[in-house]
Amino acid sequence: MPTTTHTNLAVQLLRDAAGFFRNVGEQNPELKENMFDNANVYEEVAQLLEADPEGLIELEEDED
């Protein structure tokens, strides 16, 4: 039985989700820009995770 790491699985799921958003955007012109934006975010996170699985991202604090 083939195996993979949790990181590789997560990267593949993120890329698959990006592909899904792109497909939805291609089929719905009124949603295309939003769907492609979503796809780009998923792809960027996949790249970050692949390049540095233990990396940190600084988050902005809420201004409540």
Image: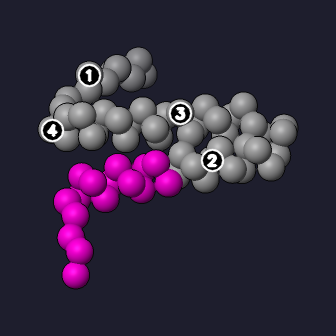
> What's the magenta bit mostly, secondary-structure-wise?
helix
When the figure is inspected, residue 25 is found, relative to residue 56, above or below; the finding is below
Answer yes or no: do the residues labelled 1 and 3 have beta carbons within 8 Å? no
The answer to which quarter of the image holds residue 36 is: top right
Q: Secondary structure at mark 1?
A: loop
Magenta residues span 1-16
In terms of depth relative to the viewer, which is nearer, 58 or 4? 4
Q: Earlier in the sequence, mark 2 or mark 3?
A: 2
Marks 4/1: CA–CA distance: 13 Å
Q: Secondary structure at mark 3?
A: helix
Circle 2 residues within 10 Å: few <14, some 14–19, many ≥20:
many
Answer yes or no: do the residues labelled 2 and 1 have beta carbons within 8 Å? no
Instruction: Kindly report which numbered mark, 2 or 1, lies closer to the viewer in this rendering.
Output: 2
Marks 4/2: CA–CA distance: 26 Å
The residue shown at (58%, 38%) is 38
Q: Which residue is mark 3?
A: 40
Q: Earlier in the sequence, mark 2 or mark 1?
A: 2
> Which mark identifies residue 58?
1
Relative placement, left or right, of 20 versus 47 is right
The answer to which quarter of the image holds residue 47 is: top left
Q: Give the amino acid at mark 4.
A: Glu
Q: Which residue is mark 2?
A: 21
Q: Position of residue 12 (x, y in %)?
A: 39, 54
Q: Give the amino acid at mark 2.
A: Phe
Q: Is residue 62 magenta?
A: no
Q: Earlier in the sequence, mark 1 or mark 3?
A: 3
Q: Position of residue 30 (x, y in %)?
A: 84, 38
Instruction: Kindly report which numbered mark, 1 or 3, lies closer to the viewer in this rendering.
Output: 3
Q: Position of residue 9 (x, y in %)?
A: 31, 59
Q: Give the amino acid at mark 1.
A: Glu
Marks 4/3: CA–CA distance: 21 Å
Circle 1 residues within 10 Å: few <14, some 14–19, many ≥20:
few
